[in-house]
Image (tube, helix red, strand yellow):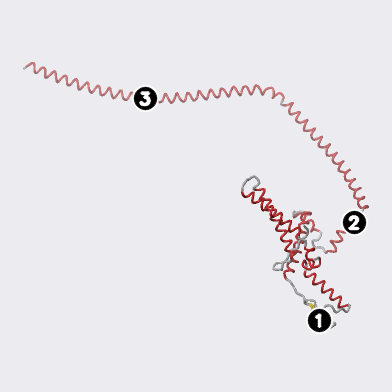
Amino acid sequence: SGDWELIGEGEKETPRHKLQRLQCEMRELCEELAHRKESVKDEKSQDQKEMVFLANQLEQAEKQLADIKLEEILGTELVANLADPQEAQLKKALSLIEDLKRGGDNFGDAKNVAVLDQKEITFQLNYRPEHARFSQTTRLAELEQRLHKMEAVLGMEPQKLTRLSLDSQRRSLLEVAESLSARANLLDSAQLDHIEGRLIALTQNMDSLAEKTGTCEDADKQRKVVELYEMVKKTETLSQVLPQVLERMTALDHLHQQAANISKSLTQLEDLQQHITSGLDNNESLLQGVQASIATNLDSIKKTIANLDKRLAQLDLK
């Protein structure tokens, strides 16, 4: 637990950084195994046994990592130097400068230090872009964290953000500071008592206005109730006649239905009568044709009989 330092890209990993990285990875692996174990909790399979075995092995490894004490193995000073080599070099350089000020001679064996004469010392300074990028990333993370805190307090609505920037628009920082100071002075006890008195007076005025408004609303309601009562009295006679009217309308509806049925029946009868009339006309034309054919046949029969009589008479004469 605690704050862990993130090393830059391409920078050599120190034993402390490596230990912290291993602890972080072990913790992430524990969380992943716990999640997987919950997912196969109800299944009696090889996966569950494997998860239990891996969890046990992981617990043992985590205990071994927790038992590692770099301070006891390497010493407190060496661990501090490994944790921040640049800080250690800076401290070493400062100590050499102090020795130089005091006239000391024990700085000839230091690394990156060249003695030109007894009164001068030259240090070689190395610039690391990774460290600069890491510092920039750290500052950006701090700024983002501050922005998140401001958003949590102020909210994300544009109206609230616009209210905050109203005082600073087209005004100098001194004017904005004076405005904020004037607002802060309003929180003085004397100002608060004055504001409280004005609020009490305003509350009393609001109460009186509410009472007057309530009386006006009550009078309006009473007037509407009287109007409704008058309308009910006027329609009271009509309400007595309405049942009879409804009964008559129901009877008329029944009569209308019967009349509609009769009209439908009459229409059907007219259609049937037209059909019968057309049938009679057809039968009459057929009868006339039959009568004409019968008359023609009778004439031919009479002629045939007359011819037969003539022949019989001729046969008798012979």
Q: Which mark is residue 279?
A: 3
Q: Which residue is mark 2?
A: 185
Q: Which residue corresponds to the image point at 37% horizontal and 25% vertical from the top-left?
A: 279
- Say which mark, if any, is on residue 115: 1
**Residue 45 to residue 264: above or below:** below
Distance between the alpha carbons at the discs numbered 1 and 3 = 146 Å
Q: Indicate the quadrant containing the C terminus: top left, top right, bottom left or bottom right.
A: top left
**Mark 3 secondary-structure assignment:** helix
**Foreground: 241 or 243?**
243
Residue 245: which quarter of the image? Answer: top right
The answer to whether 50 is drawn above or below residue 115 in the figure is above
Q: Tell me the quarter of the picture where residue 18 sits.
A: bottom right
Q: Is disc 3 in contact with disc 2, using a CB cutoff of under 8 Å?
A: no
Proximity of marks 1 and 2: CB atoms separated by less than 8 Å: no
Q: Amino acid at mark 3?
A: Gly
Q: Residues within 10 Å of mark 2 (few under 14, many from 20)?
A: few
Q: Amino acid at mark 1?
A: Val
Of residues 190 and 87, the one nearer the viewer is 87
Q: Amino acid at mark 2?
A: Asn
Q: How packed is label 1: few (under 14 Cα within 10 Å), some, or many (20 or more)?
A: some
Nearer to us: label 3 or label 2: 2
Of 281 and 258, the residue lying toward us = 258
User: Residue, x 14% and y 19% (percent of image)?
Assistant: 308
Residue at 87 percent of width and 41 percent of height: 207
